[in-house]
Amino acid sequence: MLLNCLGLPLLTPLFAPLFSLFGMKRNLQGLAERNGPGAHLGLWGMHEVECLFRAWHAYKRGEISRAELRRAMVPVRMRLRRLLALGVASEDRHARALGRDLLRLWPALWTFLSVEGVEPTNNRAEQALRAPVIRRKLCFGSQSGKGLRATERLLSVTQTC
């Protein structure tokens, strides 16, 4: 069974929404590069996500325990939550949308701290989707609902067996 970054099954891999802290980093980078009123929030957020991944990689290398990882994330989570709250209050519509969306997903973003085997990225799910997405682009998608359902079923079988 194909799982997303939260360890939840993807029922329709081509259309299932994926999100992760790495995705959040990309969004923050985009905010910083816009040079709008929310650019400073993007730069601040990128720094916090780098702190997060530095601790995550130390954990993966066995340099710190899971308990130490959780402790290291407390101040990072607090600062990121403050940043997102400032984003919601920002005059920059992109910062507002990012803050609102990520606060709505807040508990799910931190699942990797409490559930063994869940990572803060969705790399495995994205890699699993790579071949089907390329196939869809090369074939110009499905031309009918029947073709779409056939493709979904074939991809489900190939991804789960």
Image: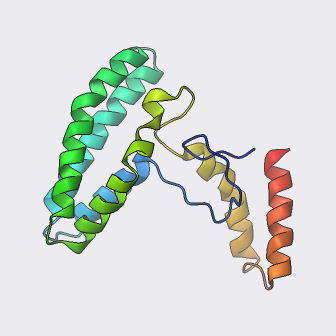
Location of residue 103 with respect to 51 vertically, above or below: below
Q: Position of residue 23 (x, y in %)?
A: 42, 53
Count numbered badges in the picture. Answer: 0
Give the camera-side residue of 74 and 38: 74
The residue lying at 77 percent from left, 77 percent from top is 139
The residue lying at 51 percent from left, 35 percent from top is 119
Which image quarter: residue 37? bottom left
Q: Position of residue 97 (x, y in %)?
A: 30, 67
Give the camera-side residue of 11 and 19: 11
The residue lying at 47 percent from left, 33 percent from top is 112
The residue lying at 67 percent from left, 53 percent from top is 10
Query: Quarter holding the N terminus?
Result: top right
Q: Determine the residue located farthest toward the bottom in the rendered image.
A: 143
Which image quarter: residue 88? bottom left
Q: Position of residue 118 (x, y in %)?
A: 54, 34
Give the camera-side residue of 47 and 115: 115
Location of residue 37 with respect to 19 vertically, above or below: below
Q: Is residue 14 left or right of residue 151?
A: left
Q: Is residue 111 left or right of residue 132?
A: left
Q: How is the image coloured?
A: rainbow
Give the camera-side residue of 81 and 117: 81
Q: Position of residue 16 (x, y in %)?
A: 62, 60
Query: Quarter holding the C terminus?
Result: top right
